[in-house]
């Protein structure tokens, strides 16, 4: 099964940018759809974005459309989440997730990373 490790979180002022990375090992990376989820304090974990096996299909929740960009480099076994124009309400622990299907990664992924904290100061 694939193992996932996130990096790139940190503290940023509102309006700033961060790029998260999700590095995979232990599986055939191109077999997996990769998604990003987040969990804010006191809230349920929510799906944020996903990218298909070859990067040809992308999906985002409405609140991040136009600000976040998901991409992948299969040669490096890595998925990125470029986050621009960050808002206070983007503060959360961000998790990457993997599943062999588009529906699975947005519902009940088979693999999760450990998470990386993103804090946006207002």
Image (cartoon, rainbow, N blue to C red):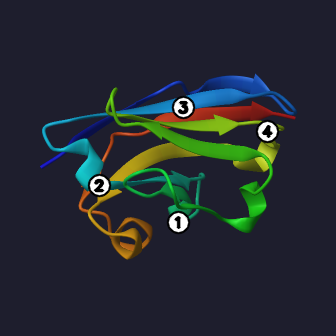
Does label 2 or label 4 sit earlier along the sequence? 2
Which is nearer the eye, 56 or 63?
56
> In the rendered image, which quarter is residue 4 located in?
top left
Q: Position of residue 106 (x, y in %)?
A: 44, 69
Q: Report which residue position mark 1 lands on.
A: 44
Assess disc 2: are there few (<14), some (14-19) or many (≥20) residues with their C-alpha within 10 Å of its C-alpha. many
Q: Residue at x 60, y 52 (%)?
A: 40
Q: Quadrant of the C terminus?
A: top right
**Which of pointers 2 and 3 lies earlier in the amino acid sequence?**
3
Mark positioned earlier in the residue sequence (1 or 3)? 3
**Mark number, residue 32:** 2
Query: Real-space Cα distance between discs 1 and 4?
Result: 20 Å
Task: Please give the label number shown on residue 20.
Answer: 3
Mark 1 surroundings: few (<14), some (14-19) or many (≥20) residues within 10 A: few
Tell me the residue that label 4 is attached to. 86
Query: Residue, x 38% and y 65% (percent of image)?
Result: 105
């Amino acid at each position: 099964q694939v193992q996932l490790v996130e990096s790139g979180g940190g503290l940023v002022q509102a309006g700033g940018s961060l790029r998260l990375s999700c590095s995979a090992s232990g599986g055939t990376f191109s077999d997996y759809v990769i998604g990003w989820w987040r969990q804010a304090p006191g809230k349920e974990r929510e799906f944020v974005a996903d990218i298909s096996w070859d990067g040809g299909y992308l999906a985002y929740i409405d609140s991040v459309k136009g600000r976040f960009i998901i991409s992948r480099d299969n040669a490096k076994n890595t998925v990125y989440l470029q986050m621009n124009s960050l808002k206070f309400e983007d503060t959360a622990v961000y998790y990457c997730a993997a599943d062999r299907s588009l529906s699975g990664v947005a519902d009940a992924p088979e693999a999760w990373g450990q998470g990386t904290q993103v804090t946006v100061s207002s």
